[in-house]
Image: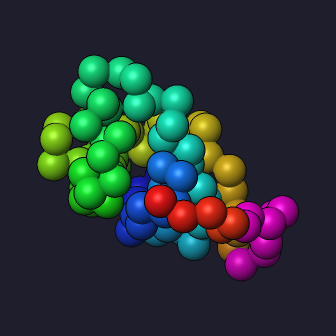
Amino acid sequence: MRIRAVIAEPEWRLRIFAEDGRTGMFDVRSYLDLSDFKPLKEVSEFLRVRTGGYYVEWACGADLSADTLESRMEWITRAGVIHGSYSFMSSF
């Protein structure tokens, strides 16, 4: 999977836009106690996410590969079809 864009969402989730048109959500919370990811507990640091095409990374040095994201992502759309629903009921 090649990542076209990434957006930090409430509750430490990432909205991933793949170049093939799929969109999905990835929950980062299970990583936050790992040493490289601890700085992401600060919302301001979490919001500084960017994509390198085959990974996402933060200024603190934490990163996740496209393979990891794809294998654990909740897909919202595939080729324009909505799979389930996702609600943003809370905020940071």
Residue at 48% across / 41% down in the picture?
28
The magenta-colored residue range is 80-87
Q: Is residue 70 above or below residue 44?
A: above
* Residue 37 position in % (x across, y down): 31, 32
Residue at 52% across / 30% down in the picture?
30
* Residue 55 position in % (x across, y down): 33, 47
In-front residue for pair 78/46: 46
Q: Is residue 1 left or right of residue 54?
A: right
Seen as rendered, the residue at the extreme right is: 84
* Residue 34 position in % (x across, y down): 36, 21
Q: Quadrant of residue 76?
A: bottom right
Residue 25 seen anywhere in this rendered image of the structure: yes
Q: How many marks?
A: 0
Q: Is residue 53 left or right of residue 14?
A: left
Residue 16 seen anywhere in this rendered image of the structure: no
Q: Is residue 79 left or right of residue 27?
A: right
Q: Main secondary structure of the magenta part?
A: loop
